[in-house]
Amino acid sequence: MISDFEDDGPGPADVDLDRAWLGVAAEVWRRQPGPTERLAGRLLRSPGLARALVTTPSLLLGWVIASVVVLAVGAAATLGTGTPYVACVAPAVAGIGIAFAYGPGIDPAWELSQSMAVSDRMVLLVRALAVFALNAVLGLAASAASGAAAEVTLGWLVPMTAVSALALATATVSRSPFTGVAAALAAWAITLLSGQVAGRLTLTITSTGLIAPYLAVAAACIAVVLYTTRIPGGTRP
Amino acid sequence: MTMTTEPLSIELSGVTRRFGRTQAVAGVSLDTGPGVFGLLGPNGAGKTSLLRMMATVLPPSSGQLRLLGRDPGAAGPRRDIRRRLGYLPQNLGYYPGFTVAEFVEYFALLKDMPPARVPRAVATAIDHVGLGDQARAKLRTLSGGMLRRAGIAQAVVNDPDLLLLDEPTAGLDPEQRVAFRALLRDLGQHAAVVVSTHLVEDVGAACAQVALMEAGKIVFHGTPAALAGRGEGTGAAGDAPLERGYSAVLAAARSGLAVRS
């Protein structure tokens, strides 16, 4: 009885189905940010930066679990032998994490990321800081659990800063996380071995005389990163 | 659409780009506005380098560049340009664990779009490229053509005033290419769109203006019809008038006769 419906007011033909569909699709496809991303969005005042942060490869669950395992083994070895393995391992773990935080070899869409309003330099710095902070917390926990002396528990934080900065600078300049990791690990291994040769492995961790050189290396490396990721003013002749 | 009274323009003056001893772009000057602009040329002609400079990814070695009335060499204007920019690189990497919707949303957020606008913009962009059925599919499960369409979706998600597409139809089947050209014509009505391609039929179907590059230089700038006219009576190779015009202009350029309309 089609004629019964003729005067029943607006029918389905008056509904903008495309618009309605897009409204439904927008709700169905929308991704709800997790608590970490919401918190990061509030702290950084940028949802884009927050999303870039939570997609950091070396902050993903698998990577964090691997870091925890390495540090836990280090803590157990320290407890068993008395040698401060956590202090030796923590800077290396942080350096690897930072080298794999951001870059052309890490982000598949890095070329595209470079054309975004949220600058790739900001993404790099935020990711590097977050990886550093997480590794510092994990390292401190492992160090405390290993029962190391206070000077050892805190002493590796300064070399960790230098190793992390070196990894970041090398990875940024070479555009390869693997080169960053290689440089950081090699430098840290040489530093530790030189302490061993001098008579004590912990010398490179606890010696207050090395704080200034470590900080100088870190500052130089950060300057290199800032220079490499500067906004080029190349549009003028 | 972004309502703006600011110029939808691309102005290049003597722009060059060197990579070591190789000169990829050799003093290109160009002035174009709203509409679809085709950038043609053989492999290695400098199209991608020129597009990357327009995308603010690569700074010029020398020359002046103004995009949407702004100088991308300064941080503030550069950010403004990027908010209004859509860019599809030639080699677009994908996050295999992202869904299509997550991928498009990620770049909408990195373009600094207001978060409240993002879900609808994502749905609209995905719908535009015909990927609605795959919106929640992981990128690793998609075909090459679908991935390309996901890339186009992220480029148009912010309804850009400046849209730069490098080989956008690579991997698309004929039906998708026809649909994409219609999308291009639609976008070109309210944005400056530059399409780099080596497929002359894309240019003929969608572009109001075309430039042909060879060895880092623009050797032809005019309408597709004018380019086709260059091939008339020359005996140049090609199955269609545009292809013959393309071949004739390239042959002339290579023999040292730069042609400009």
Image (tube, coloured by chain):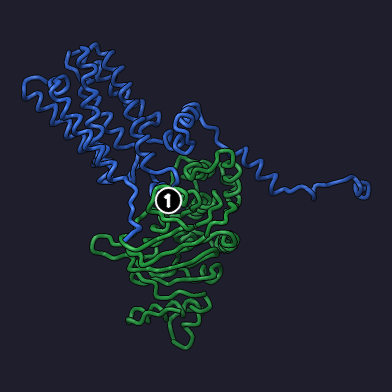
Give the SS element for disc 1.
helix
Q: In the shown orientation, is residue B173 left or right of residue A137?
A: right
B256 shown above or below A162 = below
Quarter the C terminus of chain A occupies: bottom left
Q: Position of residue A34 (x, y in %)?
A: 50, 29
B35 shown above or below A213 = below
- Residue in the picture at 57% in, 56% down: B5
Q: Chain of mark 1?
A: B
Q: Position of residue B256 (x, y in %)?
A: 32, 81
- Residue in the picture at 33% in, 79% down: B254
Q: In the shown orientation, is residue B198 left or right of residue A145?
A: right
Q: How many marks?
A: 1
Towards the viewer: A64 or A166: A166
Q: Colour of chain B?
A: green
A117 shown above or below A202 = below
Q: Colour of chain A?
A: blue
Q: In the shown orientation, is residue B182 left or right of residue B197?
A: right
- Residue in the picture at 29% in, 41% down: A226
Disc 1 residue type (three-letter): Arg
B78 shown above or below B27 = above
- Residue in the picture at 38% in, 70% down: B42
Residue picked out by circle 1: B78
Q: Residues within 10 Å of mark 1 (few under 14, many from 20)?
A: many
Q: Residue furthest bottom?
A: B233
Q: Residue B146, can we see it?
A: no
Q: Residue B24, can we see it?
A: yes
Q: Position of residue A172 (x, y in %)?
A: 28, 43
Q: Position of residue B228 (x, y in %)?
A: 50, 79
